[in-house]
Amino acid sequence: MKIIAGNWKMNGSVGALGEMTGRLAAVKTKNKVILCVPYTMLGVKSNKVVNIGAQDISVHNRGAYTGEVSGAMLAEMGVKYVLVGHSERRMYHDETNDIVRAKAERALENGITPIICVGETLDEKRAGKTLKIIETEVRESVPEEVRGNIIVAYEPRWAIGAGLTPTAQEIADAHKSIADTLSYMGLDGTPILYGASVNENNVGDIVSIKNVSGVLVGVASLKSDEFIPIIKNAK
Ligand code: PGA
């Protein structure tokens, strides 16, 4: 069983998601499929194949925080998964590891599995700091006490939406480093997804790499013609 998570970012519509979930309902797969969508689409129901998830969660529980959505509100919508610390949140909304950890904690408190994203920038990669950066991000972004489930996603920032992927060895090294760090934190067995430029042609090779439990898919999750072959080829 692999985990295939899609991230629609700020794309799509209620209608498009309804069509996608309808198509996914007919797919025969043992994989766990998650689609993280904008808040406005969370009313679209999950089905036996796909779980509808969110892309963000507030660090606050309630109160005067205009525009924020709390963990309890997500849980009320039936949300079981939420992305936290996606690189676009870290980049455009200045989310630090401390903020990401607080968001993951709010998710866990509400019975929601956070998908905690980590990954290095191009400058960090060029400086040979990839493993150091992702180890620090995992140590600081994963809650100290995990009651419930978490998922970690390794997304090299330079490869997202760029049609670029690291080499198989680079993915293997990054995932081993994350697995070792999680093990040190007492979180052996935590699923670790790879994300950035995953498509139907490379997914089979990527999920066969050691310590890769599945994938997080951006642009290729938007069209059922691209997303369904990814689900089928991930084994
Ligand atoms: P991509 O995005 O698959 O379009 O590279 C991945 C992501 O940002 O989660």
Image (cartoon, rainbow, N blue to C red):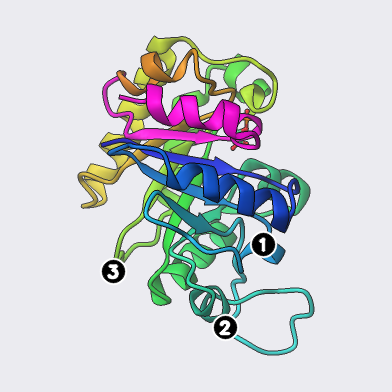
User: Splitting the image into 4 quarters, where does residue 218 fall?
Assistant: top right
Quarter the C terminus occupies: top left
Q: Label 3 amino acid?
A: Arg
In-front residue for pair 89/204: 204
Magenta span has 215?
yes
Q: Secondary structure at mark 3?
A: loop
User: Would residue 99 appear left or right of 40 to someone viewing this image?
Assistant: left
Label disc, if present, on residue 147 of the rendered structure: 3
Lower sequence index among marks 2 and 3: 2
Label disc, if present, on residue 197 of the rendered structure: none
Lower sequence index among marks 2 and 1: 1
Crowd around label 2: few <14 · some 14–19 · many ≥20 (10 Å): some
Q: Read off the residue under disc 1.
A: 41
Q: Read off the residue under disc 2.
A: 61
Q: Distance between the Cα atoms at labels 2 and 1?
A: 21 Å
Quarter the N terminus occupies: top left
- In the rendered image of this protein, does residue 170 appear above or below residue 58? above
Q: Residue at x 47, y 60 (%)?
A: 46
Q: Residue at x 62, y 71 (%)?
A: 58
Lower sequence index among marks 1 and 3: 1
- Which is in the foreground here, disc 1 or disc 3? 1
Crowd around label 3: few <14 · some 14–19 · many ≥20 (10 Å): few
